[in-house]
Amino acid sequence: MDTFKRLKEFYLPYKSYFIWSLLALFIVTGMTVLYPVILGFTIDEAIEGERYELIPYLVLAIVVTMGIKGIAVYIHQYLGDMFGINSVYKLRNRLYKKLQFLPFRYYDNAKTGDLMSRLTGDVETFRFFLSFGCAQLVNLVLLVGFSMAVMFYYSVPLTLVTMVTLPFLAIVVSKFDKRVHPGFQGIRKSLAKLNTKVQENVSGMHTVKALSQEDEEINRFSTSNEDYRKKHIDISKIWGNYFPLMELLGNLSAVLLLAYGGYLVIQGSIQPGQLIAFFSLVWFIIGPIMNLGFIINMFSQSKASGERLLEILDEEDRHDPAEGRTIIEGEFVGEVIFKDVALTYGNKERAALSDITFEATKGKTIGLVGATGSGKSSIIQLITRYYERNGGEILIDGRSIDEYSLKELREQIGVVLQETFLFSSTIRDNLAYGRPDASMDEIIEAAKRADAHEFISQLPNGYETVLGERGLGLSGGQKQRIAIARAIIMDPSILIMDDATSAVDMQTEVKIQEAFREVMKGRTTFIIAHRISSVKQADEILVLEDGKIVERGSHSELLNNENGQYRRIYDIQNQDQEYVLQQA
Ligand SMILES: Nc1ncnc2c1ncn2[C@@H]1O[C@H](COP(=O)(O)OP(=O)(O)OP(=O)(O)O)[C@@H](O)[C@H]1O
């Protein structure tokens, strides 16, 4: 029950729906039990007693009973649904909000398919229990309670005889539940696997095709699909084995009732109409008991789902003690100073960065070069505070980076990554993503600077062209230019280009960099690049190796160091170029 208790903030505000729905259910159960009572009375009094004048009143009573029941069912279902729907609406919103503010390290290990299934499947299971399962449980208790009360009222011995098979039925039901529950869990897991397979396949379709893995992917899918099919068949077999047994026990109860009840009628202890009423009432007990397995199963499934949702809600939020604070007033140039900064990711033993010291003063452009894994992007992760440093100090415009709220800090930083993510919406929306209030003129101006205006104008719907998921339909270079324009629109004080121009040709790169120089006058720019030509113009270039700065200086200064790493990279790239030119 702890899971439900911990999720109470989501459903308790709507408890009045639940209470009214239960009251309506109370009426439904009362009317359901009343029906056989009227039937019994009709047989005993109106037919056997030959008081035919009662019949119109009894018909009216049945019509009224059914009418009240109909209205009560409607109210019960409607309010039950309102209870579930509103509760999970709040829960879904909270989960989504949580996902927005979870730290980056959470996403390092998170699986998209798993998160998707939690936010949809698990939330839905929880809703179903709130809307339906919970009331079913109460319904069961009410129906069994009401029916038994009437039956005991009619005849205690007949009730006891009829109940003889019930303990056996309860044992079969509990055995059934024990077998069917893991079966359902297996189905859920298998479905989650199937979903992940499909999601990864669609997301990685380029890789699948590039490596000609279509047939293997089909085989892998078939394996998962086969597993899913098998799990369903297993459940059917359990059903097939237990359901007839449950039916048999239920019917045995009815046979006992007819045999002993018939005997009592012959003896004159009970009326025939009472026996018929009994016959209906006993199914109101047997039916719910047979359903008990399902209801228990629904309960345990929703408990499991609730736990999976709580796992997300319990995750530690990103740490932002300065949240809500605004400290930037007037001019902000985005000067970045690192003093002996160190970073070690999560549980890793090796430091990704150590002793990083540099000053990116007003208007400076800093270039970062070094081999893969040398720590270039990690420096950026610290400036944007996607990750927190483990040592040293970072100052932005003279203040410790910790003094800024994450929102305020990130509003000042424009980041263009190598991998551009574009949302499946219009180009215009994608461009204005960081500043939705940007005017069309500003958007076009930024696109022109990023050399994107021309190709956007040539698209059938121009800026209103809707992109496919992940921007499919555009070339890598086009996507990058959109990302660059997106950063320009943000009018950032600090601009970061993490290998951002690798997908555009050198000519375009020069154009974009010139445009940036114009935009970033008096502000700070970081350029991470593998191509020396991309950082040549930087005021200072930092050369990284194993998380440390091994060389620093301007392009010409670094070239003068004949044995330096920078010179070595330069020579290799130059040789490549000469080789290419010779081959041409
Ligand atoms: N999120 C992360 N969690 C754990 N380790 C990480 C994470 N990001 C990077 N690392 C590790 O930190 C080190 C530095 O990585 P970083 O991405 O900064 O290198 P880089 O110089 O930018 O490389 P590249 O040129 O390939 O982008 C690497 O050893 C990498 O495996």
Image: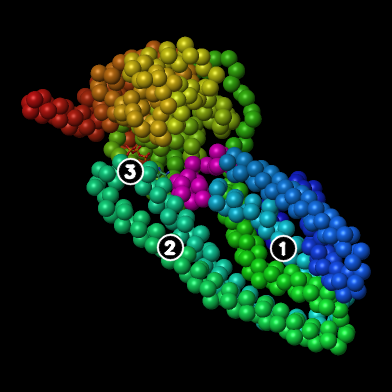
The percent position of residue 303, horizontal first and vertical second, equals 63, 59
Asked if residue 445 is positioned above or below residue 109 in the image, the reply reads above
Q: Which residues are magenta?
A: 98-117
Asked if residue 372 is positioned above or below residue 422 in the image, the reply reads below
Asked if residue 338 is positioned above or below residue 331 in the image, the reply reads below
- Amino acid type at circle 2 is Arg
The residue mark sitting in front, 2 or 3, is: 2
Image mark for residue 137: 1
At a point 33% along the width and 25% down the height, the residue shown is: 478
- Label 3's element? helix
Evaluate whether residue 386 shows in this view.
yes
Who comes first in sequence, dot 2 or dot 3? 3
The residue where tag 2 is placed is 229
In this orientation, which residue lies closer to the viewer: 358 or 252?
A: 252
The residue mark sitting in front, 3 or 1, is: 1
Local crowd size for mark 3, using a 10 Å CA cut-off: few (<14), some (14–19), many (≥20): some
At a point 47% along the width and 57% down the height, the residue shown is: 191
